[in-house]
Amino acid sequence: MKIADIRTDYLLKTFDEKDLNQNAFVQFEIWFDEAIKAEVLEPNAMTLSSIRSDGYPNSRIVLLKGIESNGLEFYTNYESNKGNELEKNNKVSIVFFWPELQRQVRIIGNTFKMNEEKSDLYFNSRPIGSRIGAHVSPQSKVIPNRVLLEESVKKMEALFNEEPLLRPLNWGGYIVEPISFEFWQGRANRLHDRFIYQLQSHDSWKIERLAP
């Protein structure tokens, strides 16, 4: 089959003005809960795009770990590519795609580091293997081989048996505070339903329908 011939018509759902909640975060939580109930594979997986120092966008999948009244939370290595990029330019875009529901959410916002207490709390809730991984991986750096990682894991496992494994200072959380949400519902014949929420002031959103 030719790539150009791959196509799906979207017939599952509609999304009309009567369905809109006036608060973008509430609307996002409604859709997120529906994605969980629909057993979407990793509903919290999101494409996070930051800006490199040369001006090019840089995208990767990260996992949403919390929804607050003012933002979306994720965790990472502060010295990774994304961490260094966010230190210089905190503007990001996020995309959630839930194909089982034929839905997409696009978000634009500003990113800020969480306080250390909250990062500690989440780090200590992670499986031990994930905590060890945060210690041993020099994320985004060039390494000679996988053996280096595996030997580092063994050393950290031995150390963990002797003393508590605390959160490394170069690892922690971010919160993305959105200035816009766009909700996209696939429809037949590519005539999709699209609504954009743009932040006007605290908890006040301007809502408009966009052409597909």
Image (cartoon, rainbow, N blue to C red):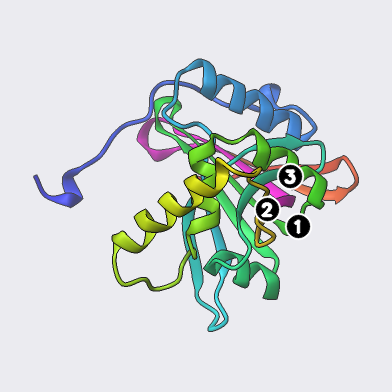
Residue at which label 1 appears: 113
Q: Are marks 3 and 1 in contact (CB under 8 Å)?
A: no
Residue 121: say if magenta.
Answer: no
At 53% from the left edge and 84% from the top edge, which residue is drawn? 54
Q: Horizontal and vertical percent for residue 61?
A: 47, 50
Return the residue at label 2. 172
Residues 176 and 75: in front is 75
Q: Amino acid at mark 3?
A: Asp
Amino acid type, callout 1: Lys
Q: Which mark is residue 120?
A: 3
Q: Quadrant of the N terminus?
A: top left
Residue stretch in magenta: 172-193
Crowding around mark 2 (Cα neighbors within 10 Å: few <14, some 14 to 19, many 20+) is: many
Label disc, if present, on residue 124 of the rendered structure? none
Residue 182: give x, y in percent of width and height: 62, 44
- In percent of the image, x 63 and y 45: which residue is there? 165
Determine whether 1 is above or below 82 in the image: above
